[in-house]
Image (cartoon, grey):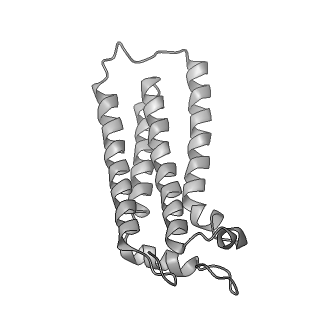
Amino acid sequence: MEQNGKYTPQSLRVAIFIQAFLIIAVFAYFSILQSIPPNVIISMDGNYRDTITVILSVFGMITFVTGYFSPRLLRPRRSAVRFNLPDTQICFFIQLVQAGSFEAIAVYGLIMGILNISLGIVLVFFAISIIGLFLTFPTRAKWDKMMTKFKPPSGSQIE
């Protein structure tokens, strides 16, 4: 149980496990993409391929920004206190949003690869995903910083 903003090491361990699993998943996506025979890859005309590339690139940018700024976007407000969300749960949710956002970028890259979009563009998506997952990898220092940064508003109590 949590007391006065202290976190249980288990929530951090679970966050580390999830993040590590997602990093492995990104490498698995790339391996799967490389093992698909050329006759299975979907071929399309240039206009359609360009449209899909632009759409997935925009989704990728939005997803990246959401993942990067999620600690600020999901900062606890009075509602978190009203529902008695403990600090560790808030930090865990933020960590999941970040990890999921960066992993989604790899999924966009996988889709582009299956649709036979340029390997260079696909590699950029995988690289951004891996970099984002490593930069946001949960450590005790980052967790402690997040815990102190996202204290409930003054004058409120979490039991």
| Rendered view: 13 above or below 25 | below
Residue 79: x %, y % from top left: 70, 68
Can residue 144 be seen here? The reply is yes
Residue 34 in the figure: left or right of residue 125: left
Query: 106 or 17, which lies in front?
Result: 17
**Image quadrant of residue 124?**
top left
- At 33% from the left edge and 50% from the top edge, which residue is drawn? 21
Residue 58 in the figure: left or right of residue 14: right
Query: 61 or 91, which lies in front?
Result: 91
Can residue 121 be seen here? The reply is no
- At 45% from the left edge and 47% from the top edge, which residue is drawn? 103
Residue 35: x %, y % from top left: 28, 26
- At 59% from the left edge and 61% from the top edge, which residue is drawn? 70
| Rendered view: 18 above or below 88 | above
Residue 143: x %, y % from top left: 44, 73
- At 48% from the left edge and 82% from the top edge, which residue is drawn? 3
Outermost bottom residue? 155
Residue 42 in the figure: left or right of residue 85: left
